[in-house]
Image (cartoon, grey):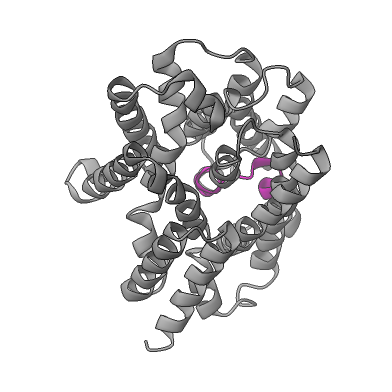
Amino acid sequence: MKSNSECWKEGFKDGIPICLGYIAVSFTFGIMARNAGLTTFQAVLISAVNVTSAGQFAGLGLITAGAAYMEMAVTQFVINLRYCLMSCSLSQKLEPETSVARRLLMSFGITDEIFGVSAAFEGRLNPFYTYGAICVALPGWVLGTFLGVVSGNILPERILSALGVALYGMFIAIIIPPTRKSRVLGGLVLASMAMSFLFAQIPLLNRISSGFKIIILTILIAGVAALRYPVSEEAADER
Amino acid sequence: MSGNLYIYVLIMAAVTYLIRMLPLTLIRREIKNVYIRSFLYYVPYVTLAVMTFPAILSATKVFWSALAGFLVAVILAYRGGSLFKVSISSCLAVFLVELFF
């Protein structure tokens, strides 16, 4: 069993690519927030308490449009609903005895990326691993926002473009290695990418928002896979 | 802007946190149902794959650099490269290809 501090360090290390990718994304958010007339403090505050890209961009749009509070709540709910699926999945990866306080603390940082690395943690998830990843990723998210607001052109366009794939590269590093050992997982990843591609191409389907697309495809594909290839108790414990 | 900015931010943060927090704190026991267990086991793979492709292909300035970044990441990941190595190499590939554009 690894100690809490070892797990924390491991999470911190895996959080570095997330931090870099976040700087690139939140940098753009910072620029947009400034253009929308927000102060540096306000933009940084939004990033620090939300830590979610799509939700923040949509929220910014609603703030600028002067939308109703209810509209804001519903939009955030719909856009961020995918986190619910992710949290359900992580709930089964935690030791059942994990305290409520630790669960509450972890929850704050469940972004697509933190979820990704946490789900890939070997064996039961130690919350300290997730804390470690949050400790490096969150400052990146906030710093990027800050830089975007104070100076729209501090990062050269080439660097921003290159950092644009950082988070995707990380996702690939999470989902590809297990496909070598399991043909089911290999087929699952391929099918998911193919369906996602189709959804992006087919008229009407390509108008579904990305948050909803993720939810629909996850329920559909993982649902069928679970039916056809149920995971034995031992295999699920080993993950 | 017609509403109060801080109320907007509070609503955003509260809704987002609740969505993340409720399942993690409410589902404290191990689910015994094989179907649900299997479903939740498959969720990360499907979710991350759907988010990555084809979105990665439009994440950079030009298509070809994105394609290079994608291929480099897949090859290195298949060979068992670490998160950091795969991610940074993918960025480097994009950077190098864009030098030609």
Q: Quadrant of residue B2?
A: top right
Query: Who's the residue at 41% across and 44% down the image?
Result: A181
Q: Position of residue A150 (x, y in %)?
A: 70, 69
Q: Which residues are magenta?
A: A46-61
Query: Who's the residue at 65% across and 58% down the image?
Result: A19
Q: Position of residue B38 (x, y in %)?
A: 42, 23
Q: Please state if A92 lies on the left or on the right of B33 as rendered.
A: right
Q: Which residue is at the front of the view, A214 or A171?
A: A171
Q: Position of residue A186 (x, y in %)?
A: 33, 44
Q: Which residue is at the front of the view, B68 or A228?
A: A228
Is A97 above or below relative to B91? Answer: above
Q: Which quadrant would the N terminus of chain A be assigned to in this image? A: top right
Q: Position of residue B18 (x, y in %)?
A: 62, 25
- Tell me, yes or no, whether the highlighted magenta stretch contains residue A47: yes
- Tell me, yes or no, whether the highlighted magenta stretch contains residue A199: no
Is B41 above or below relative to A15? Answer: above
Is B49 above or below relative to A75? Answer: below
Residue reaching furthest bottom?
A: B100
Q: Please state if A15 lies on the left or on the right of A25 as rendered.
A: right
Query: Who's the residue at 75% across and 31% down the image?
Result: A105
Query: Who's the residue at 38% across and 89% down the image?
Result: B100
